[in-house]
Each structure stands twice: as C-alpha cells, then as structure tokens.
Image (cartoon, grey):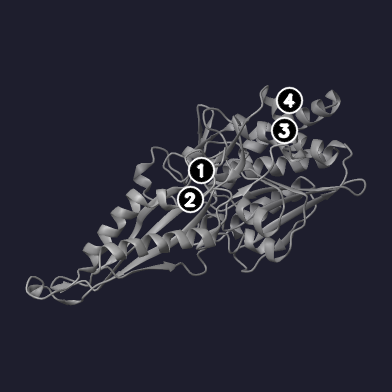
Amino acid sequence: MDKNIIEKIDNLIESKKDEIIDFTRILVKELSETPPGDEVAVSKLIKSKAREWDIPDPEIWAKKENRPNLIYKLKGINAGKTLVLNSHIDTKPIGDISQWTVNPLEPKIIDGKLYGRGSTDMKGCAASMITALWAINNSGLDFKGDLILALTADEEGGSAFGAKVLIEKKLKADAILIGEPSGINTNFDTLGLACRGALLAKIIVHGTQMHSSLSDQAHCINASVKMAEVMVEFSKNLKEKLHYKPHFLYPNGPTINPGVILEGGIFYGVVPGVAGFGFDLRVIPGMTFEGFKRDIEDFLSDLKKKDKDLDAELVLEKPPLNTWIPAAEIDKDHPVVKACLESTKIIKGFEPELIGVPFGTDGCFFANELNIPTISSFGPGFIKLAHGPDEYIDVDSIIDAAKIYALASLIYLNS
C-alpha cells in the first residue's frame, strides 16, 4: 500500500486520539443493556459525534422504536464493491456490581485500560469503526464502491431487533467485517474466519405425578430422577453419536452443554410428573439442523429401548429465541481477509492467526441468510473479558483498530 496513504490515515487518527478515547468512555458509560434492550440513548451519542465529524446522517432501520440500527454510508468515486463494517451497540447486563473492583457505571482509565461494561464487547470497536469512517471521509483519498457502517442492536439478545432487521431489509454487500474482540494473548493476534452456531432446545421427561408418601408402594416414575439419568447419558455419550465431518478450524468438534436450564417438580409431597433440561450445543461448519435433530432423536430412541419406563421427547425453542443457528465460515483467501491481514501487518507489524472462534456472532445470520462472505470476529479487546466483571479494553487498541479498519477498507474497496 502507498506510504502516503498510510501516513495520511495515521496522522488523521492520531490527531484525534484523546477525543476518540473520551468518546469511547462516554459510549461505555451510557447503558444499553440487553435485557431489557434499549439502544436509543447510546444511538443519540453516536449520531451527535458523527454529525460533529461531518459524517453523513445515517438511515435508521428499526422494527421497534427503542431498538434502532444505525446505517452510515460513504459513497466512492465510482461503482465498485460494497464493504460493511459492523459492531453491535448493546451489552450484557452488569450483573452483580459487587464483583467489580472498578465501578462499571463510571468508566475509568487505569494503566492504559478503559474499564466498564461493554468496553471490549464492543463499544471500543464501535468507536474505532466510526473513527475509521471519519478518517476516510476527511482524508481526500479516493475509493471505489460503497463503505457502510452498520451499528446494530440486540446482538446480546438473539438479534431479532438487530441483524435480523438488516436481513429483512435485504442488506446488500460483497463482504462484512464484524469487529467482535479477537485478541487471545495480544490484541489482534487472531482473525475469526468462522464462528460456531448453536442448537438450543430441551429434553422433556414425563413421569407419574402422585402423592409422594406412596412412591415406595405404587409403581411410579419420578420424572426428575429419569431426567437426571438422561442428562448424564446426554453429557457422556451424545457426542460419539453425532454425525459430522471434522473441520480443520474446530478439531474438537461440537461442544455439548446439557443442563443449562433445569425444570421440574411442583412442591414437597408430590412426585414430579414432568421434568426437563435445556441444552446448548455449539455446532461447527457443515452441521445441519435436520442431521442434528435426527441424531438426538435417535439417541433418545436408543435410551428408551434400554429403559421401558423412559418417556422423553425433544422440544425445540420458539421465537424470539433461535432454536437453530448454523455456523458460518469465510474462505481464507477472500479479498477482505487479505485486506485485514495486510492492514494489521502495516499497523501492528504482524499478521493475525486465522482461527475459528468458539462463540457465535451475527456472522451466522449474515453469511447464511444473506449469503454475504463475513469475517466473524476481528476487533480490539479480548473475548475472555466479555460479559464478566472488570471488563476493559486497552486504549491503544481502540486507536490501532481505527487505523486497521480504515486501511483494510481502502485496500479491499480499491482492490
């Protein structure tokens, strides 16, 4: 890449370094937790800063008034490809504030780290992407095609009011870059080529509801006990029954998480007639809903053959929950991947390792429902810090990310 372009982007972003960090702190301070779900206040802060920076006003795509998605667009000098930069602007709830050593409601910078809920997941990224848009818009540099910044709601709640709205609006693009935190040991040391999907469902076991004083005299089935037996079998033996092709990014295959929800029992004195457990199975690229469902039903059928008293069924979740989210993957040789590798090498002096991330992102929806090649995770921060107490982001990584995104966008759009 031309050294003059690199220098111009670098100088522009460095000139606003203090302002960018302060803007990030303000974004983190403004709560936008899901649940309950309300991104209006944080959206107002973003729109105000974008207007101050002479970025054209966004389109607002929303299914619900208090769940806005901000769609910013910069048009190039002539026709070309369309690249979408994406960050969600909601966060998980703070939870037990006593577990924090730094007040998450008063974000502070300590030893170069900005602490607060949503700092790494992913308001630091949102600030970086807005900055990248500003830098390109004010650089005087030419690019082809369109650059879109999509700041989305509801990612932490299932995306019904976020990514799903973009899908309903039929967002068109040639590539999407999601800035989920991708650091493992150092910032930007990995790039998520793939993300895992999920199957969320329950196993419901039926028994005999009756007076508990008679349970040793009459033949009865304690649904909670049977459910526990099924859950243990599920945990120990289901994986070997699943049919899937090994994937080089996921050598350990899918992950089995039974018992994430437990249900059963009425009160003392009553043998439970119904009990169940919810499970969370993290699926890898290539696995299908039909195949997974069939494997689980066959597994239950085998258990029933061994235990004539077992009455168990698979129950799928219903909207707004997604019972099935397929995994997503982008080719390692896709131009947007190469653009990110090149821009990181320029700014950080190394190329990130290409990995499959263990979690899910909105890339599952964009790649599978819009058929848009999507980088699932490449952003500032560490995923291990997300959702927990004392979440933080390195302030320098916010600035580095802005430069990386700006250069990657120019490389990709002009390639």
Task: State the separation of the CA atoms marked 2 and 1.
Answer: 8 Å
> Of tags 4 and 1, which is closer to the observer?
1
Q: Which of the two residues, 306 or 353, is positioned nearer the viewer here?
A: 306
Residue topped by disc 3: 403
Residue topped by disc 2: 282
Question: Do the numbered discs 2 and 1 sit on residues whose CB atoms are within 8 Å?
Answer: yes
Q: Please give left or right for residue 303 compared with residue 152 in the image.
A: left
Query: Residue at 73% across / 37% down in the picture?
Result: 333
Which of marks 2 and 3 precedes in the sequence? 2
**Few, some or many residues within 10 Å of mark 2 (<14, 14–19, 20+):** many
Task: State the separation of the CA atoms marked 4 and 2.
Answer: 35 Å
> Of tags 3 and 2, which is closer to the observer?
2
| Mark identifier at residue 358 | 1
- Mark 2: which amino acid? Arg
Task: State the separation of the CA atoms marked 3 and 2.
Answer: 33 Å
Which of marks 1 and 2 precedes in the sequence? 2
Can the viewer see residue 35?
no
- Mark 3: which amino acid? Lys
Task: State the separation of the CA atoms marked 3 and 1.
Answer: 27 Å
Q: Which of the two residues, 289 or 155, is positioned nearer the viewer here?
A: 289
Query: Residue at 56% across / 38% down in the picture?
Result: 249
Quadrant hosting residue 128: top right
Q: Secondary structure at mark 3?
A: helix
Residue topped by disc 4: 346
Q: Please give left or right for residue 104 compared with residue 378 in the image.
A: left
Which of marks 1 and 3 precedes in the sequence? 1
Task: State the separation of the CA atoms marked 4 and 1.
Answer: 27 Å
Q: Secondary structure at mark 4?
A: helix
> Of tags 3 and 4, which is closer to the observer?
4
Query: Residue at 83% across / 39% down in the picture?
Result: 138
Question: Do the numbered discs 4 and 1 sit on residues whose CB atoms are within 8 Å?
Answer: no
Residue 247 position, x and y percent, is 56, 41
